[in-house]
């Protein structure tokens, strides 16, 4: 049975979101098992239930009046190893980067390019986290999730998650399931590293590394991220605030004529992806500060909290940026982070 004394009241969520926004939770509980989670979800006195994982991909703009449920499940295990592959199951509340380092210590390959991404394991599939040429879907085997309505556990295969660019079944069906554990498919030997992303190649060349090991790739990624992206422990942020927009070749042609230097990556024969960071920088926002909300000096795609910004201030800045980009380029950039 659930001890209702475990519920805390009127606590600040500042330590629970990487933006460091100081909103309050009227009621808060950390749960560490599926049974506990089921019990909490059945509490009738709290109509609104707000699921909180690592808090790395959200902007909180108001106090939470209902019950915040912090997913704190811990544990990592190697389920099996065969034919050069391992299935590794990790509980949702484990820190993402610590999990990556743990797999590298076991000489398991696949997560190295995803080093140093803030957040927890359970939220990684929701937005199909990705960096430096690798996405979660490339190493994802399955996940376990609790259906919030029926309180039944369901296993989702890679295919069933319907992963897309910063997108998944879970993102498109918000609030239906809570991911409780993720199983990864990793390599146990003859690791195939992905160093094709320009910045990784350059970093390895700088160190004169050829045929990089998985640990060397991880270190290169860590160095790149540390040089470009602010550490949320020192400067509140949520990584990329917007998604990189994908536009049609027809819409792209006139832009290319007007801005011949515009960076772009083909997505299909008919579409290209434009780095939102470039669009935002062209609008003059890079490094700008408005009160305690700002745009990072090394990466215009990252909005930061200099200390005491409210969620609303950050959101107003995001809207200002969105409007400026739309006005100058006729492109609508959409937030990557969840706004509450
Ligand atoms: N750029 C600028 N100015 C900027 C930032 C970027 O001109 O201020 C242009 C440059 O041309 C640069 C290009 O954008 O070469 C790409 O920049 P970067 O390599 O930093 O990648 P990104 O597209 O801005 C994406 C992900 C990041 C991920 C990196 C590396 C999205 C929304 N973001 O950023 O993911 O780390 O690629 O793979 O897709 C995150 O999701 O939170 C995140 C940090």
Image (cartoon, rainbow, N blue to C red):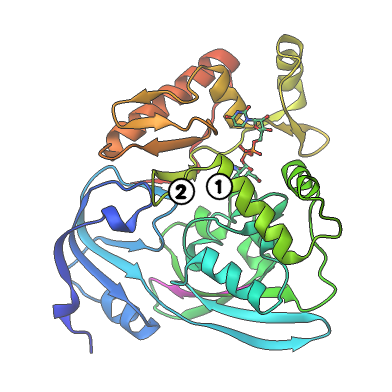
Please name the residue that numbered disc 2 is placed on: 231
Q: In which quarter of the image is residue 86?
A: bottom right
Residue found farthest to the front? 207
Compared to 335, does 100 lie above or below?
A: below
Badge 2 density bin: few <14, some 14–19, many ≥20, Cα 10 Å:
some
Most foreground residue, 267 or 11: 11
Magenta part, dominant SS: strand
Left/right of residue 227 with respect to residue 288 in the rendered view: right
Please name the residue that numbered disc 1 is placed on: 226
Q: Give the residue displayed 66% in from the left and 79% down from the top.
A: 106
Residue 143 on the magenta span: yes
Q: What stretch is highlighted in magenta?
A: 142-148
Of the four image quadrants, the one with ligand 1 is top right
Mark 1 / mark 2, whichever is N-terminal:
1
Most foreground residue, 182 or 295: 295
The CB of the residue at mark 1 lies under 8 Å from ligand 1: no
Q: Residue 135, percent across and down?
A: 67, 56
Q: Residue 319, percent across and down?
A: 40, 27
Q: Give the residue displayed 61% in from the left and 36% down from the top.
A: 244
Q: Residue 17, percent across and down?
A: 35, 53
Q: In which quarter of the image is residue 66?
A: bottom left
| In contact (CB < 8 Å): disc 1 and disc 2 | yes
Q: Give the residue displayed 31% in from the left and 46% down from the top.
A: 60
Which secondary structure lies at badge 1? Answer: helix
Left/right of residue 56 with respect to residue 206 in the rendered view: left
Residue 238 visible, this orientation:
yes
Q: Give the residue displayed 23% in from the left and 47% down from the top.
A: 22
Badge 1 density bin: few <14, some 14–19, many ≥20, Cα 10 Å:
few
Compared to 21, does 295 lie above or below?
A: above
CA–CA distance in space, label 1 to label 2 = 7 Å
């Amino acid at each position: 049975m659930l001890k209702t004394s475990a519920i805390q009241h009127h606590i600040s969520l500042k330590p629970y979101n990487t933006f460091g926004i100081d909103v309050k939770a009227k009621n808060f509980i950390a749960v560490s098992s599926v049974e506990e989670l089921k019990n909490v979800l059945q509490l009738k006195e709290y109509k609104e239930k707000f699921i909180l994982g690592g808090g790395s991909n959200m902007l909180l703009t108001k106090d939470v009046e209902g019950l915040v449920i912090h997913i704190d499940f811990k544990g990592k295990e190697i389920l099996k190893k065969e034919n050069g592959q391992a299935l590794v199951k990790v509980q949702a509340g484990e820190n993402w980067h610590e999990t990556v380092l743990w797999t590298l210590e076991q000489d398991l390959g696949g997560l190295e390019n995803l080093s140093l991404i803030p957040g927890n394991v359970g939220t990684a599939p929701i937005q199909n986290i990705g960096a430096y040429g690798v996405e979660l879907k490339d190493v994802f085997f399955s996940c376990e999730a609790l259906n919030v309505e029926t309180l039944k556990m369901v296993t989702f295969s890679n295919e069933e998650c319907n992963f897309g660019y910063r997108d998944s079944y879970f993102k498109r069906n918000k609030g239906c399931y809570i991911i409780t554990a993720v199983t990864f498919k990793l390599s146990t030997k003859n690791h195939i590293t992905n160093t094709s992303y320009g910045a990784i190649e350059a970093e390895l060349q700088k160190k004169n590394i050829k045929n990089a090991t998985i640990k060397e790739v991880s270190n290169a990624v860590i160095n790149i991220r540390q040089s470009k992206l602010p550490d949320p422990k020192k400067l509140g942020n949520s990584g990329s605030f917007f998604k990189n927009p994908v536009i049609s070749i027809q819409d792209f042609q006139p832009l290319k004529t007007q801005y011949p230097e515009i960076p772009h990556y083909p997505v299909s024969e008919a579409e290209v992806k434009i780095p939102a960071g470039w669009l935002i920088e062209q609008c003059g926002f890079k490094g700008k500060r408005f009160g305690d909300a700002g745009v990072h000096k090394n990466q215009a795609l990252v909005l930061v909290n200099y200390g005491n910004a409210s969620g609303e201030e950050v959101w107003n800045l995001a809207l200002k940026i969105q409007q400026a980009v739309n006005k100058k380029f006729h492109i609508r950039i959409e937030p990557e982070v969840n706004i509450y």
